[in-house]
Image (cartoon, grey):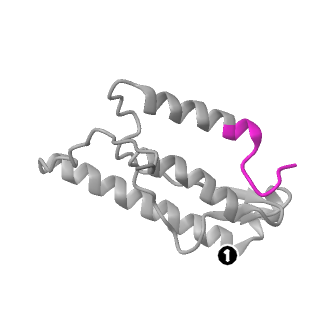
Amino acid sequence: MHYAAASGNMTAFMDRLFYSELGGNGNKAFYMKPAAAVISARRAGTTATFDQLNKYFTIQEMPVVSSRYWNMVHGTNAGQVRQDVEGLHTMRVLGKNMAYLLRCQEAARKAGIAMPEREEPVFTNFVR
């Protein structure tokens, strides 16, 4: 059971994966890679989890692909999820939007349009 957040295993995995990217010497493994969090739950907690996972993407300058609604489906099992007509619609739109963005990035590469130049990070502690 998870209480309105990603599982501990998922959080630990994401923390380590994205920390290694931040700590790397200019590593650009995730830079400008389109990302989308997809959440499945029995009832609630999906919006907090959705927000939590999207923060990993934005800290790495990854374009976050959206849908018609938040990327979530509901149900206790696959059969119940298949009955979530709104959730399935959201997933179809998300898939189409992701495919479109990937095609746009490929077209940009072929046209010689460079990605934005990545700036060195600046860290502050808000104390002056």
- Who's the residue at 33% across and 40% down the image? 121
Left or right: 47 as drawn, with respect to 92:
right
Front-most of residues 84 and 33: 33
Image spot of residue 107 (x, y percent):
21, 53
Measured along the vertical axis of the image, is residue 53 above or below residue 68? above
Front-most of residues 72 and 9: 9
Q: Is residue 10 magenta?
A: yes
Q: Which residues are magenta?
A: 1-11
Measured along the vertical axis of the image, is residue 31 above or below residue 66? above
Which is the main secondary structure of the residues drawn in magenta? loop
Q: Amino acid at mark 1?
A: Glu
Count of number-bearing discs: 1
- Who's the residue at 53% across and 52% down the image? 55
Image spot of residue 72 (x, y percent):
66, 63
- Who's the residue at 68% across and 34% down the image? 12
- Who's the residue at 49% across and 27% down the image? 20
Image spot of residue 61 (x, y percent):
38, 48
Left or right: 14 as drawn, with respect to 66:
right
Picture quadrant of residue 103: bottom left
Question: Badge 1 is on which residue?
Answer: 86
Front-most of residues 94 and 125: 125
Left or right: 51 as drawn, with respect to 27:
right
